[in-house]
Image (cartoon, coloured by chain):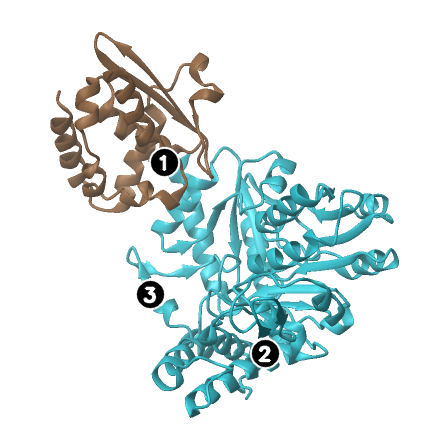
Amino acid sequence: MKIKEIQNDIIEEFSLFEDWKEKYEYIIELGNSIKIIDKKNKIESNLIKGCQSKLWLHAELKNGKVIYSADSEAIITKGIAAILLRVFSNQTAKDILDGDIKYIDEIGLKEHLSPTRANGLVSMIKQIKYYALAYNN
Amino acid sequence: MIYKMSFDLEKIRSDFPILKRKINGSNFIYFDNAATSQKPNIVIDSISDYYKNYNSNIHRGVHTISQEATDAYENARVKVQKHFNIQSSHEIIFTSGTTHSINLVANGFQDLLNDKDEIIISGLEHHSNIVPWQMMAEKNGAKIKIIPINENGELDMEVYNTILNNKTKLVFVNHVSNALGIINPIKTIIEKAHKLNAAVLIDGAQASAHFKTDLQELNADFYTTSAHKLCGPTGIGMLYGKEKWLKKLPPYQGGGEMISDVTFEKTTYAELPHKFEAGTPNVSGAIAFGVALDYLNGINFEKIYKYESSLLDYATKKLNLIPNLKIYGESKNKTSVISFNIEGIHAYDIGALLDKFGIAVRTGQHCAQPIMDHFGISGTVRVSLSFYNTKKEIDVLYKSLKQVISMLS
């Protein structure tokens, strides 16, 4: 599926939630079910330093597509990381570079991506793009 | 002018317009007071009044409003002097806040110390209290020694006694710890340092909002605070320094106000306090700082401390009812701050969900990574209470926290 299509699916799913509680329960569920990073990749060099919670991101190229995996100490951060990876993982480097994250705004999670939130997610998005840039060259 | 007021909680709350806000549909509950306090109308209005009626550059103008602004600015200095019982008003420098004050002192000591000298910093310090000294030490080679903390988060005074020696020239301790709220034994620290002729700087940013400090009695060489921690605006604070020290320290910044005579060959510096107040100062900020002190003194600091202690007791008891909740820094001697974690749940998750309930708390390291390293944790949830908070709000926190935990487990 193309990045835009997945993003639209996510927007539609989130539109069904009646209040913030349902939304966050879903994010927590995603956080608990995310396919976490392989232990061997949970290393210092994959660590994205946020002020508050540790966040790991690993990337590898398989059959021309970039596969990302992630983990975080905080479950909400992990859940949002899952929403980001659902969109950006298993895509071509070029599509990842062309993709935007406006859908995060539309599903009402923008606050977690504010640079001052210091949960590492902003750095994670940058890192996703850096990997794509590296694999694209 | 002192605004007469008894401790009427309802009246006090009505002084703070922000407390009427709703966040995510819930009544706003502000428990991040150690980061910054909220502002009463009287402080907010004083800033608007200044800009509407007598905004002017101070000290040099001959016209009416310049004199009014100068009077109001200098009157604010006198209010600070009275509040902290400082011997003379020229021992008070208006700075942009505690961080600026500490940098001013550190910069001044850069030339006074060399690689044979030592300085002592407590292990409870806020980042802003560590970095300026590291920068100073890089330049003059002075050694930095640390007073570690014990398992209760209190300073280890036995270690202090052993690292304090004839080479010690400066000791820096916060009056109250930012992350844990513990009141440090600064009186003892100062007395011991003075026996060896070491100067002492106290960071009073976390103390000033909760109780009054008599600086002549305390006898610290320097003391600093930020107005925004005590119902005043951001961008203004004070540095108190004993006259002998302020005379000894070189000026920090060059510019207008701080000079008395300038030729291309030589500049003569102005007298205290203007030597350290280069350029146009934060006039409205200083005035509003004075108004904030009046406001708090009108309520009465003893009443504030007593009420905040009762809130702290209530919140501590209530939070301790929650299974697997651990409070850090359970010292008997602390201000109304509770730093805690719940086993198996990350502080960020708790903070993010409490926000959804309209409750503002702080999560993370509270700019005090050394303390977090000491406890071997990556952060805590910090609830910091103020005199305008209520027991009812603590009940809402308790209920919301239970819901947050059930969502997260």
Residue B244 image position (x, y, % from top left): 76, 69
From the image, tell me which residue sits under label 3: B21
| Label 3 SS | loop
Residue B409 image position (x, y, % from top left): 42, 34
Disc 3 residue crowd, few under 14, some 14–19, many 20+, Cα 10 Å: few
Chain ID for label 2? Answer: B
Disc with the residue nearer the chain's start (2 vs 3)? 3
From the image, tell me which residue sits under label 2: B77
Relative to B78, does residue B125 appear above or below in the rendering?
above
What is the C-alpha distance between the residues marked 3 and 1? 26 Å
Amino acid type for the residue under numbered disc 1:
Ile
Quarter occupied by residue B81: bottom right
Of tags 2 and 3, the one toward the viewer is 2
Which chain corresponds to the colour cyan?
Answer: B
Residue found 31% across the figure and 25% down from its top:
A130
Amino acid type for the residue under numbered disc 3:
Arg
Amino acid type for the residue under numbered disc 2:
Arg
Viewer-side residue, A29 vs B126 = B126
From the image, tell me which residue sits under label 1: A76
Disc 2 residue crowd, few under 14, some 14–19, many 20+, Cα 10 Å: many
What is the C-alpha distance between the residues marked 1 and 2? 47 Å
Q: Is residue B155 visible?
A: no
Of tags 1 and 2, the one toward the viewer is 2
Q: Is residue B149 left or right of residue B229?
A: right
Disc 1 residue crowd, few under 14, some 14–19, many 20+, Cα 10 Å: many
Residue found 31% across the figure and 31% down from its top:
A126
Q: Colour of chain A?
A: brown
Q: Are marks 2 and 3 on the same chain?
A: yes
